[in-house]
Image (cartoon, coloured by chain):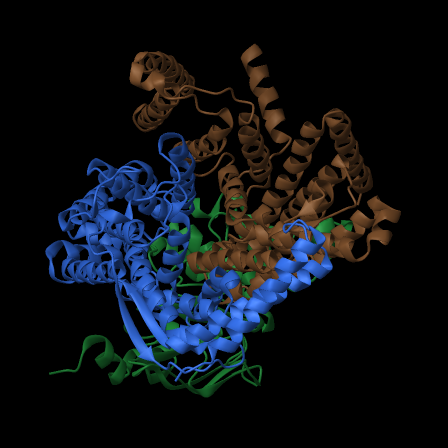
Chain colours: A blue, B brown, C green
């Protein structure tokens, strides 16, 4: 079913796309914070990625409090532990977001917006580098705390009988040749001459061929860890909750009013300050949830004070892509971003992954200056 | 034009003498020399970004990319023509500055064109993205075994402090000249109101692109100097942070003020660099410093908003608050360190505090003076005249 | 030959026809009025003439040449300049600088000479400043030449807009509600000022205004728009007695 075309392995495409989509949900969750804050204050909250980072630390500390300190001997965790961690990082981030708004952004609200922007950059640097003084670095949340450790394995078929015996034979011959070479020349295996390198690379090529053949024989399988699925489901629930809050509650209506016209909303008796604080709270809570999920379910996520940088930038691009200030746009942007990344990795341009995100953004903005779902404001003359 | 040539030649002479004076003073210590060169480059960068951001009002956040284009142009050219470069390094560097400026100017043209369609935040984001794209592409550029994420080594070193400063003075002069002419006013007009500028016949497209090209070209020239001074150019020297720092210099100095850009560039460059020499510090002291900084800022804001007395009294009040803050911070620091648990924490390296102090300076300055140090005003000799008059008045 | 001619100029925004087949001609030297109730399409008409919008259909001729769809700055350099209903000054600049900026259009010293600040550029700047001072005198703002334009009073800002537009040395000056927000005395002064400017600089003036007395006393020819349609055209007396105009302003008689 899946055949390699022009050096690109089609069989890995489904896995990359699914991974990308799952990651896209996380991007979307963080992008919501950027977009909502921009909606009400027209401010790019550069510190949002750092709020996300603090969320990861909240989850980490909670996991420690639950006994999952480094090198513990505990067994698998309980479901309630995950929920406690989620709540802890959501609360932690919510408080941080509100504090930042109150003490860093509110005093500058009547000043040119660039002043808030610079303050946001300053806060981001402060949390990154100040955090290095006060926070433990290079930590991992023990993956044992996740009770659902397995993964869905879905066979997509496409397996093909391959004669591995010949390849195995070749590999053995090449390896033997290399061993013999080493024995003969007493060369340092880490410092080979040209001949040695040639023999070694032949052996390596044979090994690769065998592995590829074995993979082809197995056919295409999708591996989706339970944790990532849990994260996706939780994200969807959170987004539904947010939609309800924004679209069907009084506060949500006030929020939308403020984002349409800040001054008019305050003249209509809306307590603008409390709405702005509420917006920061909501956005930061979403970031907290995202942080906990990345830190817990994504294997190899090392937590340090720069944890939020990559996710922050990606989510920010996603928010702009969808049309900053537009909530459905942020979700769309996040998912697109994830899928694009999957696609780019699949094509083998992993080194250019981050650049492609920006290329997509620039192309979209040039075609639609307000983002995918946003509309560029036309100034009245 | 009476008096034109004496003034012009005088200023050029002054710039040359100034540049060589700085060169002489920084001699003897490699570290100082490096700082002085980098300071000049940052001045150039801030002034050139000020032309785009401050004067023309096009919010660009990818200035490091132009800097990098200049540096990489020089590095790669040197890689391909090492003999030519080694023959007369200084002449080569001058050539590279021009070539780097041309290439960066070309990049500026590339970025300037989208600026015609995008405004405000969207433009900021696109320029930021452009910066990242250029950096990531550069990170993957390889010629044979050279290049990649380690960058290129530039084997022709040129340690010319005077040249870096002369170039900085050149950038300042160009921007100042432009602003003194009617053409310069059209740049300001584009910042103030595009629609009205168009209606008055200003070619907004051309103005914006011109600003981008000149700003980028100056940054490119600075990049070439950097590459030959450091002896290498790699993409991690030009991350998003560098762009942010340059934007910060422009805003902190006062958006649109050339004087502000220069002062802020020197200040923001030297303050963190000096922090490298800080001794290791106990964590209690650092905590006290953070807490008291917050409180002092809050108090200063309160004073500025609620005290409406004479300016001199107000200034005394300000300094009182600051002194009180320092005293309390010292007491609190000592007190915190008396707690055994706090005392047990190992000392924090002074160097680690470098960017923290940078960030705090940024936030504090913005909270206390959002319009930037110089607002929109420029340095002029009138200040001294006025100061003189004031002191005369006091004396009589 | 007429200076400006609109031929069936039409513009639609989606389903809304803001200006529908409007035609009129302005002769050189005329003081021409464009009136109509709110939302009649007067400012849109201005935007069509000055190139802010491109007409959906129809033609606009300036000195016999079609200008529809030309960029605003090109139209300005051909000799049409305007003021804005919601004042659009270059706020952070001084009064003098506002006018000098507009005057620069006619002086094309090269960019390089500006960057090098050559004697020619210095001379040009001086000349522009002198010209600007003349214009400021004409609108009696010379005493505040070095004040920041945002600090001026409303009436002064309107006059500054006129001076700024004049600095481009237009053949046709478009004034968008120049008397809005002025008291009777200021309006009286403005009336004199507009006449004065026309005499002194040999201009043609097209203006939008709501104040009937002001328009009737100033303009020689008037076009009335309502709901994007042209409903009447003629001298002040004809317009005053036109039943359609009365209906548009006061409603249909019962």
Query: Residue shown at 11%/58% (left/top)?
Result: A249
Depth check: give the residue in front, B317 or C100: B317
Q: Is residue B346 visible?
A: yes
The residue positioned farthest toward the right in the image shown: B87
Query: Residue shown at 24%/37% (left/top)?
Result: A64
Query: Residue shown at 61%/45% (left/top)?
Result: B45
Q: Is residue A322 above or below residue B26?
A: below
Tell me the quarter of the image containing the N terminus of chain B.
top right
Tell me the quarter of the image containing the C terminus of chain B.
top right
User: Residue C21, position in %: x, y?
Assistant: 38, 88
Would residue B272 appear left or right of A327 to someone viewing this image? right
Q: Is residue A380 visible?
A: no
Depth check: give the residue in front, B250 or B42: B42
Residue B26, picture quadrant: top right
User: Residue A308, position in %: x, y?
Assistant: 37, 48
Residue B324, picture quadrant: top left
Depth check: give the residue in front, A162 or B274: A162
Total marks placed: 0
Q: Is residue C180 above or below residue A219?
A: above
Would residue A376 appear left or right of B82 to someone viewing this image? left
Q: Is residue A162 above or below residue A315?
A: below
Would residue A36 appear left or right of B262 to someone viewing this image? left
Q: Is residue B123 above or below residue A303?
A: below
User: Residue B305, position in %: x, y?
Assistant: 32, 29
Query: Residue shown at 79%/35% (left/top)?
Result: B16
User: Residue A12, position in %: x, y?
Assistant: 41, 73
């Amino acid at each position: 079913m899946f055949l390699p075309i022009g050096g690109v392995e089609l069989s890995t495409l489904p896995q990359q796309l699914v991974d990308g989509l799952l990651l896209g949900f996380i991007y979307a969750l963080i992008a919501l914070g950027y977009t909502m804050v921009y909606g009400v204050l027209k401010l790019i909250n550069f510190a949002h990625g750092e709020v996300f980072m603090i969320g990861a630390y909240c989850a980490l500390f909670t996991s420690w409090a639950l006994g999952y300190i480094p090198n513990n001997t505990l067994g698998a965790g309980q479901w309630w532990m995950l929920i406690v961690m989620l709540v802890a990082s959501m609360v932690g981030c919510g408080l941080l977001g509100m504090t930042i708004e109150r003490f860093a952004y509110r005093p500058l609200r009547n000043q040119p917006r660039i002043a808030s922007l610079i303050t946001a950059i300053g806060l981001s640097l402060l949390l990154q580098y100040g955090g290095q003084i006060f926070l433990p670095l290079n930590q991992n949340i023990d993956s044992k705390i996740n009770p659902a450790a397995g993964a869905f394995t879905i066979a997509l078929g496409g397996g093909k009988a391959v004669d591995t015996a010949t390849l195995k034979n070749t590999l053995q011959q090449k390896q033997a040749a290399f061993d013999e070479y080493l024995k003969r020349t007493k060369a340092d295996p880490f410092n080979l001459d040209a001949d040695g390198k040639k023999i070694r690379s032949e052996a390596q090529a044979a090994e690769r061929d065998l592995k590829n053949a074995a993979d082809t024989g197995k056919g295409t399988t999708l591996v989706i860890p339970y944790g990532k699925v849990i994260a996706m489901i939780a994200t969807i629930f959170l987004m539904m909750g947010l939609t309800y809050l924004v679209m069907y509650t009084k506060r949500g209506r006030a929020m939308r009013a403020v984002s349409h016209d800040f001054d008019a909303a305050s003249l209509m008796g809306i307590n603008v300050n409390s709405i702005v604080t509420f917006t920061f709270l909501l956005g930061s809570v979403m970031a907290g949830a995202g942080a906990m999920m990345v830190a817990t379910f994504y294997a190899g996520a090392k937590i340090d004070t720069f944890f939020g940088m990559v996710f922050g930038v990606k989510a920010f691009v996603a928010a702009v892509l969808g049309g900053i200030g537009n909530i459905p746009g942020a979700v769309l942007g996040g998912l697109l971003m994830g899928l694009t990344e999957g696609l780019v990795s699949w094509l083998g341009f992993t080194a250019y992954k981050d650049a492609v995100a920006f290329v997509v953004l620039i192309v979209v903005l040039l075609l639609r200056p307000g983002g995918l779902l946003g509309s560029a404001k036309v100034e009245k003359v | 034009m009476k008096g034109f040539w004496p003034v012009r030649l005088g200023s050029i002479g002054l710039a040359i003498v100034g540049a060589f004076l700085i060169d002489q003073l920084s001699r003897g210590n490699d570290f100082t020399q490096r700082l002085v060169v980098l300071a000049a480059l940052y001045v150039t960068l801030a002034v050139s970004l000020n032309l785009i951001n401050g004067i023309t009002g096009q919010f660009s956040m990818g200035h490091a990319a132009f800097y990098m284009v200049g540096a990489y142009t020089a590095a790669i050219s040197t890689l391909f023509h090492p003999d030519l470069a080694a023959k007369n390094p200084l002449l080569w560097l001058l050539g590279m500055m021009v070539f780097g400026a041309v290439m960066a100017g070309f990049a500026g043209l590339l970025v300037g064109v989208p600026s015609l369609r995008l405004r405000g935040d969207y433009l900021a984001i696109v320029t930021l993205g452009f910066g990242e794209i250029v950096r990531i592409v550069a990170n993957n550029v390889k010629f044979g075994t050279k290049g990649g994420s380690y960058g290129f080594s530039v084997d022709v070193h040129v340690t010319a402090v005077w040249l870096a400063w002369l170039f900085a003075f050149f950038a300042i002069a160009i921007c100042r000249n432009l602003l003194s002419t009617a053409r310069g006013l059209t740049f300001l007009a584009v910042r103030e109101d595009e629609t009205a500028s168009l209606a008055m016949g200003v070619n907004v497209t051309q103005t914006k692109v011109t600003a981008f090209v000149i700003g980028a070209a100056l940054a490119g020239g600075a990049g070439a100097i950097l590459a030959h001074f450091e002896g290498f150019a790699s993409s991690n020297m030009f991350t998003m942070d560098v762009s942010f720092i340059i934007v910060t210099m422009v805003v902190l100095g006062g958006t649109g003020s050339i004087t502000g850009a220069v002062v802020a560039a020197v200040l923001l460059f030297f303050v963190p660099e000096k922090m490298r020499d800080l001794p290791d510090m106990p964590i209690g002291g650092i905590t006290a410093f953070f807490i008291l900084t917050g409180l002092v800022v809050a108090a200063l804001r309160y004073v500025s908003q609620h005290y409406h007395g004479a300016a001199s009294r107000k200034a005394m009040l300000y300094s009182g608050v600051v002194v009180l803050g320092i005293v309390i911070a010292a007491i609190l620091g000592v007190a915190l360190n008396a707690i055994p648990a706090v005392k047990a924490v190992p000392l924090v390296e002074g160097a680690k505090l470098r960017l923290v102090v940078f960030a705090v300076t940024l936030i504090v300055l913005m909270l206390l003076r959002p319009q930037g140090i110089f607002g929109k005003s420029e340095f002029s000799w009138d200040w001294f005249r006025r100061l003189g008059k004031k002191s005369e008045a006091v004396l009589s | 030959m007429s200076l400006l001619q609109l031929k069936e100029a039409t513009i639609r925004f989606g389903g809304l026809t803001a200006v529908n087949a409007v035609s009129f001609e302005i002769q050189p030297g005329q003081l021409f009025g464009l009136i109509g109730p709110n939302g009649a399409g007067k400012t849109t008409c201005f935007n069509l003439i000055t190139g802010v919008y491109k007409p959906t259909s129809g033609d606009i001729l300036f000195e016999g040449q079609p200008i529809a769809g030309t960029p605003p700055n090109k139209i300005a350099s051909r000799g049409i300049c305007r003021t804005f209903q919601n004042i659009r000054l270059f706020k952070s600049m001084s009064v003098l600088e506002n006018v000098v900026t507009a005057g620069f259009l006619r002086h094309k010293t090269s960019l390089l000479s500006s960057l090098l600040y050559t004697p020619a550029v210095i001379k040009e700047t001086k000349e522009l400043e002198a010209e600007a001072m003349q214009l400021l005198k004409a609108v009696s703002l010379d005493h505040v030449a070095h004040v920041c334009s945002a600090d001026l009073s409303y009436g002064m800002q309107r006059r500054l807009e006129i001076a700024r537009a004049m600095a481009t040395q237009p053949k046709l000056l478009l004034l968008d509600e120049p008397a809005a927000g002025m008291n009777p005395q200021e309006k009286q002064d403005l009336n004199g000022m507009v006449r004065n400017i026309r005499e002194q600089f040999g201009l043609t003036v097209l203006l939008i205004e709501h104040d009937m007395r002001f328009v009737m006393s100033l303009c020689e020819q008037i076009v009335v728009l309502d709901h994007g349609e042209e409903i009447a055209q003629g001298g002040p007396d004809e317009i005053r007695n036109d039943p359609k105009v009365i209906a548009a302003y006061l409603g249909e008689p019962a």
